[in-house]
Image: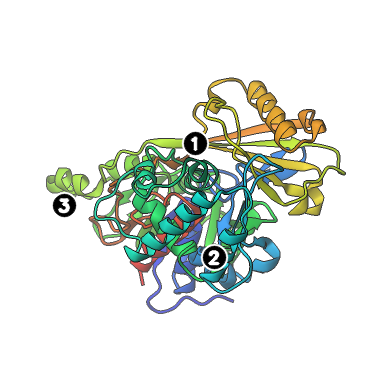
Amino acid sequence: MFVAKPNSKRIAVIGAGWAGCAAAVKLSQNGHQVSLIEAARTLGGRARAVEVHGKRLDNGQHILLGAYTACLDLMRLLKIDVEQSLLRLPLQMVYPHQTGMQFIAPRLPAPLHLLFALWQAKGLAREDKLALARFSTTARWIDWQLNQDCSVSELLQRYDQTERLCRLMWIPLCIAALNTPPERASAQVFLNVLRDSLGARRTASDMLIPRQDLSRLLPDSAAEFVVRHGGQVTLGKTIHTLTLLSNGKWRLPELSSAPSDDLSQEYEFDGLVVATSAEQCQKLLAQVDLPEVEKTNSSALLKQLVFDTKFDYEPITTCYLQYADSVQLTRPFFALADNPAQSHWAQFIFDRGQLNSQQAGLMAVVVSASTAAIADSHAQLTQAICQQLAQQLQLPHLAQPLWSQVITEKRATFSCTPGMQRPQNQTAIANLTIAGDYTACDYPATLEAAVRSGLLAAAAFS
């Protein structure tokens, strides 16, 4: 039976995406009584499970890196078998047949794994390999830091990267990591990701593909951890108002209507972590209900609370295609040759059957930064993707799936542009923090950024 520590606080975490789940776990581990509150009926936020044609899939195909230490450490804390839950592959960029290149890092100590991968790479000319070696050497020499941020396109031009290398490696990596076109993407954030993957130990560059849906991968285990440590988890409850009481505690008025078995009858909290989307967080902070003693200074306090960063967003679209169970690719995933003239074309295809035996014949095809791709109908997008797959994989039957499902997360990530000023986790009120992949961090909007943010937000209550 859980026994609260003498200095235990009652803390509410609003939002059960990966940031909120990370904060809730850390707070519970530190002995606090946590109430994790989620507006949706499924845990995970923008990385969650969905039901598609009787299958439990994701609202978008994700991939992690070995460099995602916060995610991996949190999974181990939750007793998740990382090696069983994730398919670990060496760093690779492999295109089907003659449509691109084949770059696969062997399991050698860094940086030998990159040198051998570069030496053995197929589809790259000598000048491409020299350009890649030059870029890597220069990035290490400047310690992966720019004097002034610029776009990824400008960075690649500055270091004389060849057109073919940009098209087959740098641009796909940029779009996959930052979900922002290179002409608008932050070069410094891109270098941060490369520093922790290409520039670190060999395993940091490994690609980790979830074998199970994203809610089960971490959020469900996080919720169980919170409950085991004396906390509560409430789904389907939207919080619209934050009320600061004169005693310094917080009240969430919407909880007063919660069933008694949902949350305890006490609705006052010693602290809050707001782990919603940036927009919802801004709305909540702008409408904090202050105690009478603060009314005279309310305008100034509210102004301090609300961060003024305006985010633009990039969508990510995943097209699920079901074929006969016997259909299987020769690799778990392929990069796909892009064509700027074809706005509907995808960048990657994942063979879900090689990840989960219950999903034989199912392909997940990803279109990042998909604003142009979703301008037309789902039917047009699906048809274009099927034609792309049949052509590039040289498998005509891929043009005719048994069924398809297009899922677009319209605000999947913020546009990670040069020089962005992202808000800190701490607010103007000591017992109120915020968490999300949009807060100040070296990384773009990724699962790793979300988890790191949640841990930082929780650390304020230690």
Q: In front: 318, or 164?
A: 164
Label 3 sits on residue:
293
**Badge 3 amino acid:** Val
- How busy is the neighbourhood of tag 1: few (under 14 within 10 Å), some, or many (20 plus)? many
Label 2 sits on residue:
115
Residue 369: give its label: 1
Q: Mark 3 or mark 1: which comes first in sequence?
A: 3
Given this view, does label 3 or label 2 mark the residue nearer the observer?
A: 2
Indicate the quadrant containing the N terminus: top left, top right, bottom left or bottom right.
bottom right
Q: Is residue 265 visible?
A: no
- How busy is the neighbourhood of tag 3: few (under 14 within 10 Å), some, or many (20 plus)? few
**Badge 1 amino acid:** Ala
| Residue visible at 67% across and 22% down in the picture | 379
Tell me whether circle 3 and circle 2 mark residues in contact (CB < 8 Å): no
Q: CA distance from mark 3 to mark 1?
A: 48 Å
**Badge 2 amino acid:** Leu
